[in-house]
Image (cartoon, rainbow, N blue to C red):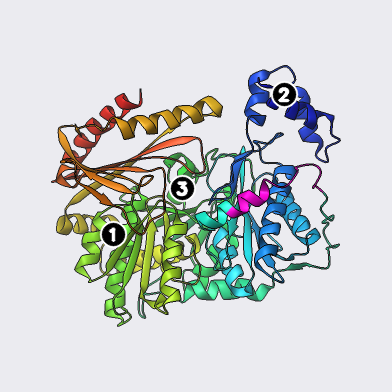
Amino acid sequence: MNTSVENSYRDWCSRSLEDSALTEELQDISGKDDEINDRFYRDLQFGTGGLRGVLGAGTNRMNIYTVAKATRGYAKYLLSKNEKPSVAIAYDSRINSTLFAQTAASVMASCGVQVWIWPELMPTPSLSFAVRYLHTSGGIVITASHNPAKYNGYKVYGPDGCQITTEAAAEIFASIRTVDIFKDYSPVKYEDGVKAENIRIIPEECFTSFIDAVSAQSLCGDGINKNVKIVYTPLYGTGLKCVTTCLKQNGFTDIETVKEQSHPDGNFPTCPYPNPEIREALEVGLKTAAEKNADLLIATDPDCDRVGIAVRKGNDFQLLTGNEVGLLLLDYVCKRRMALHKMPQDPVCVKTIVTSDLACKIAENYGVQVIDVLTGFKFIGEQIGHLEAKGEEGRYIFGFEESYGYLTGSYVRDKDAVDGSLMIAEMFAFYRAEGKSLPDVLDGLYEKYGYCLNTLHSFEFDGESGFEKMQSIMKAFRTDVPEGFAGKKVLAVSDYETQVTREAGGKEEPIRGLPKSDVLKYRLEDGISVVVRPSGTEPKLKIYISTSAENRNAAETLEKKITEEVGERLK
């Protein structure tokens, strides 16, 4: 343990901390060098996603002091950019989310920033909407999305309702670094019923307007039977009020909620990893769906910006991936807009570089332009903003990412599981009226455009040594470029850090229009690709594999070989 870490630990131990749990934790780790080092070897990193980390004591943990420090730095930034700055705040059901939201509100108020805060836990997209509706200078959401219970986070939004840009994040981070975590900790006290003069509650009309904005995205049309038996689970999070209100407002009234997971609980007792991308998180919902003889299971993650589904298939249920639902929604949105004469001139779809390239073929069929962006829905929101700046936001019809995030309108600048839930429900009802299931429709898309299998593999690297290991792996992937995987030759490598694409023959082409990012994309023969990138929110290295083949069996066989060879390189 180096001197800096030891001094920081001793400094924290010498303080009379407001949160007694932090003091107890500091006492418990006394003499445990590895435990101390992990909490103090660095400050919790602030990036375009804000903060995210494990709850606990120390500079590398989420606690009231790291939240207050980040907030004071963000307040300084807002005051430097605005004469009378304001900020909207939302929070989810996670451990300490309410406390952190109140801490952020108090710090902002003490700095002279006008605060608008939701009076109850609300989805992340409702914060994006509130920023735009109230015309605030920025926004904060206390959430760690779909991470396990030990995590929490702090996401920052700009005045456009989009997560902050790389440039803004750098400026805010520089401002945060000028703040002393204890010396500058002096927020006004926030207590229920006794609020500072410049802390106001976001009005109910904002919630109503949000639901109306989502409802305006409907493309189902008249005469479609919406008597769909839906089982819904918010996975202990924020989605219950918004999702059920929106579905009922649009004619989907036969909704059964999963009782065990309907009430907010940051411990997530029946789904330790509350991520609708994985089957384990949906097991309780699937059991309820079977008991209630439901047609459709809808699950949203704790901050309700991602949505996963399962559809009845005989006596069982079939889960659909984020890519599969995204392809279905893209085709549905295009088809229905054409039928209802709502397709704009020069329509645009935006997706991330790790999302299925089959979307390009579907979009081409409808004359839709596809824009590829870096991983993270903020980059999709940024593209909507570019269109809005030109008065062309009406051209945007759909955006999605493989990690179960969807958005069909420009009313927010982030993925929205309230919108996703509504569009999935009406898409289900529309095709059922034609005698088709969603798997039937998906098979039809594969038959028309070719089969494409997309998989994600995550490798965890905890602590300081794990962080260094990920960096060395990324360096190795850059400097020792493989000739191919599973017998498929590498045709080109796009390095989004150096902003250059290098072809196998040595030719180089610049990557334009995208910010720098620690991402590598290998393009192989036969439309196959492999993407390698460190997660921006978790201590994980993520490998995305897209495999095109004549059928699923062939694609799975090829994908397995590629995965094994990539795994060998990781060793």
The magenta span reads: 171-185
Along the horizontal axis of the image, is 256 left or right of 65?
left
Q: Is residue 405 above or below residue 37?
A: below
Count the numbered circles shown.
3
The CA span between labels 3 and 1 is 21 Å
Mark nearer the N terminus (3 vs 2): 2
Camera-nearest residue between 454 and 32: 32
Kind of residue indicated by mark 2: Glu
Q: Is the residue marked by circle 2 packed among few (<14), some (14-19), or many (20+) residues within 10 Å? A: some
Q: Nearer the viewer, mark 3 or mark 1?
A: 3
Name the residue at 29% across, 52% down: 510
Q: Earlier in the sequence, mark 3 or mark 1?
A: 3
* Residue identified by numbered label 2: 6
How packed mark 3 is, by other alpha carbons closer than 10 Å (few <14, some 14-19, many 20 or more), is many
Does 182 lie within the magenta span?
A: yes
Residue tagged 3: 276
Main secondary-structure element of the magenta-colored stretch: loop
What amino acid is at disc 3?
A: Pro
Up-down relation of residue 203 to residue 196 (above or below): below
For label 1, the residue is 437
The quadrant where residue 28 appears: top right
Q: Position of residue 548 (x, y in %)?
A: 19, 46
What crowding class fits label 1: few (fewer than 14 Cα within 10 Å), some (14-19), or many (20 or more)? some
- CB under 8 Å between discs 3 and 1: no
Q: Residue 148 or 82: which is nearer the viewer? A: 82
Q: Please tell me which residue is depicted at 47% across the width and 54% down the height of the picture.
A: 306
